[in-house]
Image (tube, rainbow, N blue to C red):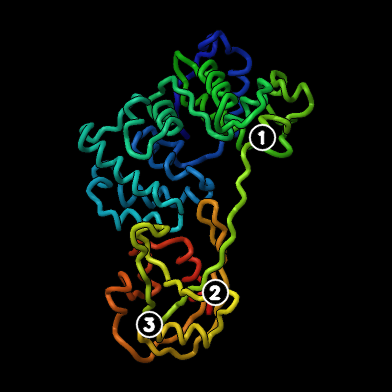
């Protein structure tokens, strides 16, 4: 477990403290999840965890965080790695811009800060990919600086405590929440533990729907609980409807290896290898149509073309249904023409050596089960 020093709760900024702090911290010490990044005070390891956790479930990150640190145990190792090596280890986590930013941040730390992660939130924010939340989280958790990181969980807890309505992500409501968080963060030690306790309460008890007020250690000081309508806070934010798309991809095998195409500049996800997409309307795709299109585009004659199945994939606000057609190449050039992009043929067992998208991994699982 993370070994923070004892927290003195008699005062905090703005004179807020006392029972609320003591009760929440006592609950946190009993009930917090045993997450691997909570067992270290290494600022680099904590920075990696914070960037990995953005828009990704904790259960997905745990194993990937361990593997990432085994491969890149410190700033120097990550800064000296190639972009492809970093992306390969990030494959499947999504939001690949984070991996590129983390790689760039490691190089900035090496080149500008002598390989040491800055302790001050203001200097952390100068690093690529490090915004206000991440800077405050690393500064408080790794260095015990009195900085208030406000993620979605903490924002929900604060909004309910103080009955603050509005969009917690932006505008006046977000600014009010930030002020409250700054008032509450301890100034005389224990900021990191306090911030984690606040976020943990939101993750485990103060849930968006059906909050578990009966299990909350600070329900007696919560305005929304007293009102009896905790789900009313913080209120609705801007809803973004996902854009639904469908695409056809070809899984083409030749002598035990499969054709992958690397996405170019401006393609999403940029720089990652994927099974090639075909310009064929999803509703009109048939094995015969796919076989004809493969031969027309790349000069490959295929046999045993069949629809393997579908996979669903999410990229930001895009919800993508992928129809997968598999076929065996029996004649044609060794590789498509260079004008068609960058291609590589790879065995499924070597897929982890390449930077590939989450959709590629899902298709590979389909192929492994065929």
Label 1 or label 3, whichever comes before in sequence order: 1
Number of residues whose C-alpha sits closer than 10 Å to that of mark 2, classed few (under 14), some (14–19) or many (20 or more): few
**Residue under label 3:** 256
Taking the image as shown, residue 107 lies to the left or right of residue 320, namely left
Numbered label attached to residue 319:
none
Per the model, the C-alpha gap separating discs 1 and 2 is: 46 Å
Label 2 or label 3, whichever comes before in sequence order: 3
- Percent across and percent down for residue 309 are 57, 75
Element type at marker 3?
A: loop
User: Splitting the image into 4 quarters, where does residue 202 fall?
Assistant: top right
Per the model, the C-alpha gap separating discs 1 and 3 is: 50 Å
Residue nearest the observer in this picture, 114 or 142: 114
Element type at marker 1?
A: loop
Is residue 85 depicted above or below 228 in this figure?
below
* Picture residue at 40% right of the left edge, 37% below the top: 46
Residue nearest the observer in this picture, 329 or 295: 295
- Percent across and percent down for residue 56 are 51, 47
* Picture residue at 51% right of the left edge, 76% below the top: 280
Taking the image as shown, residue 180 lies to the left or right of residue 269, namely right
Q: Nearer the viewer, mark 1 or mark 3?
A: 3
Report whether residue 103 is seen: yes
- Percent across and percent down for residue 28 are 58, 29
Residue nearest the observer in this picture, 38 or 244: 244
User: Splitting the image into 4 quarters, where does residue 92 fall?
Assistant: bottom left
Number of residues whose C-alpha sits closer than 10 Å to that of mark 3, classed few (under 14), some (14–19) or many (20 or more): few
Numbered label attached to residue 205:
1
- Percent across and percent down for residue 365 are 50, 70
**Residue under label 2:** 281
């Amino acid at each position: 477990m993370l070994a923070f020093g004892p927290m003195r709760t008699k005062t905090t900024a703005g004179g807020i403290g006392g029972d609320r702090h003591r009760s929440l911290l006592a609950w946190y010490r009993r009930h917090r999840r045993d997450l691997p990044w909570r067992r270290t005070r290494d600022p680099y390891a904590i920075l990696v965890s914070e960037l990995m956790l953005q828009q990704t479930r904790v259960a997905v990150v745990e194993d990937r965080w361990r593997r990432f640190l085994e491969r890149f145990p410190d700033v120097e190792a990550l800064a000296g790695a190639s972009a492809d090596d970093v992306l390969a280890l990030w494959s499947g986590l999504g939001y690949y811009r984070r991996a590129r930013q983390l790689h760039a941040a490691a190089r900035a730390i090496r080149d500008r800060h002598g390989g040491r992660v800055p302790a001050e939130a203001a200097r952390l924010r100068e690093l690529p990919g490090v915004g206000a939340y991440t800077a405050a989280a690393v500064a408080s958790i790794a260095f015990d600086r009195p900085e208030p990181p406000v993620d979605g969980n903490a924002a929900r807890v604060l909004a309910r405590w103080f009955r603050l309505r509005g969009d917690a992500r932006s505008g006046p409501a977000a600014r009010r929440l930030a002020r409250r968080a700054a008032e509450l963060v301890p100034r005389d030690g224990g900021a990191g533990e306090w911030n984690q306790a606040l976020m943990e309460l939101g993750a485990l008890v103060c849930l968006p729907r059906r909050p578990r007020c009966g299990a909350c250690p600070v329900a007696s000081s919560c305005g929304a609980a007293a009102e009896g309508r905790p789900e009313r806070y913080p209120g609705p934010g801007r809803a973004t409807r996902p854009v639904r798309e469908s695409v056809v991809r070809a899984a083409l095998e030749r002598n035990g290896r499969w054709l992958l195409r690397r996405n170019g500049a401006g393609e999403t996800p940029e720089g990652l290898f994927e099974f090639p997409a075909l310009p064929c309307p999803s509703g009109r795709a048939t094995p015969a149509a796919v076989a004809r299109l493969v031969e027309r585009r790349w000069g490959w004659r295929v046999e045993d073309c069949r629809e393997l199945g579908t996979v669903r994939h999410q990229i930001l606000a895009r919800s993508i249904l992928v129809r997968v057609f598999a076929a065996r190449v029996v004649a044609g050039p060794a590789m498509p023409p260079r004008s068609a992009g960058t291609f590589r043929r790879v065995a499924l067992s070597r897929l982890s050596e390449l930077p590939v998208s989450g959709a590629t991994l899902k298709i590979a699982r389909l192929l492994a089960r065929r």
